[in-house]
């Protein structure tokens, strides 16, 4: 089932009086239960595209549609708070809080219905993602990069969203850790029915995904 669509998206940056086109009439759709990757050369516009489907920026033209509703109509803030979880290359956790506090904070912000025993849910979620309780109680600065990225994934999941978006999530991790994170993404899509969209340079991650799109010359095309 389609959950997210982009329709005729245009995006450009204004460089003095020159217009630099980044995305040109991009239309495509993403389904629940699938793990997608977006490949493309450096500077091709992958992060820009992700920023539009995460409602961190607006297209110059065209629409981003979540469950048949324009996210502009829904409100970008509401979409970000309740519909998507975002994972960044640099984790973007709050460093002076513990892992479990980071997850609880995300749960406090969402309007989505969550179970009442949030602390248990947060610990269970972290445990599921590979962070045992003793690590969940550590401040972020006392966790390794791979562990921090796991916390970021748990945080993205904690609000019960259907879509997980990630920008180079394994960019700072070694190969072994990359494989483990990719296995989590696969499981989220195939077992938990999430729509997972990952921007990456890694052909290996792309090979593990269900479908890859390639961004080039402002166009996003399925990659064989
Ligand atoms: N705020 C901005 N103003 C002007 N140009 C920008 C801005 N942000 C990005 N760009 C340019 O837009 C192009 C696309 O950038 P984007 O970050 O989306 O590419 P990318 O494919 O994610 O690259 P990378 O793989 O290196 O992260 C780049 O040439 C970049 O320099």
Image (spheres, grey):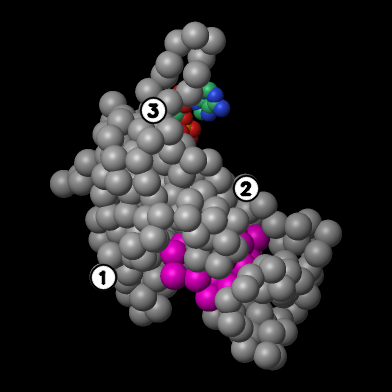
Q: Which residue is mark 2?
A: 90
Furthest-front residue in this view: 73
Q: Residue at x 43, y 26 (%)?
A: 12
Q: Nearer the viewer, residue 126 or 158?
A: 158
State the CA–CA distance, disc 2 to disc 1: 31 Å
Q: Nearer the viewer, residue 70 or 194?
A: 70
Magenta residues, start to end? 148-164
- Quarter that holds the N terminus: bottom left
- Counting residues from the start of the chain, the first of labels 1 and 3 encountered is 1
Pointer 2 with pointer 1, Cβ within 8 A: no
Mark 1, other Cα within 10 Å: few <14 / some 14–19 / many ≥20: few
- Visible in this render: residue 130? no
The x and y percentages for residue 153 are 56, 65
- Most extreme residue toward the left, as rendered? 224
- Answer above or below: position of 117 versus 168: below
Give the distance between the C-alpha atoms of the residues marked 1 and 3, in whole angstroms. 29 Å
The residue wearing badge 1 is: 1
Residue 99: image x %, image y %? 72, 69
Residue labelled 3 has its Cβ within 8 Å of some atom of ligand 1? yes
Q: Could you tell which of marks 3 and 2 lies nearer the N-terminus?
A: 3
Mark 2 vs mark 1, foreground winner is: 1
Secondary element under disc 3, as helix, strand or loop, is strand
């Amino acid at each position: 089932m389609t959950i997210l669509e982009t329709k005729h998206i245009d995006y450009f940056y204004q460089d003095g009086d020159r217009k630099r086109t980044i995305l040109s009439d991009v239309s495509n759709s993403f389904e629940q239960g699938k793990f997608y990757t977006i490949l493309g050369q450096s500077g091709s516009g992958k992060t820009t595209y992700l920023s539009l489907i995460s409602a961190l920026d607006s297209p110059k033209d065209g629409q981003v549609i979540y469950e048949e509703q324009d996210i502009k109509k829904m409100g970008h803030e509401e979409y970000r708070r309740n519909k998507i979880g975002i994972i960044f290359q640099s984790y973007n956790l709050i460093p002076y809080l513990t892992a479990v506090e980071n997850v609880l904070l995300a749960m406090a912000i969402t309007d989505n219905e969550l179970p009442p025993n949030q602390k248990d849910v947060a610990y269970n979620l972290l445990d599921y993602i590979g962070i045992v309780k003793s690590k969940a109680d550590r401040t972020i600065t006392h966790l390794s990069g791979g562990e921090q990225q796991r916390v970021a994934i748990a945080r993205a999941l904690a609000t019960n969203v259907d879509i997980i978006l990630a920008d180079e999530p394994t960019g700072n991790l070694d190969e072994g850790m990359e494989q483990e994170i990719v296995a989590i993404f696969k499981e989220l899509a195939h077992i938990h029915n999430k729509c997972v969209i990952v921007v990456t340079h890694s052909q290996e991650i792309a090979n593990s995904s269900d479908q890859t799109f390639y961004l080039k010359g402002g166009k996003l095309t399925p990659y064989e």
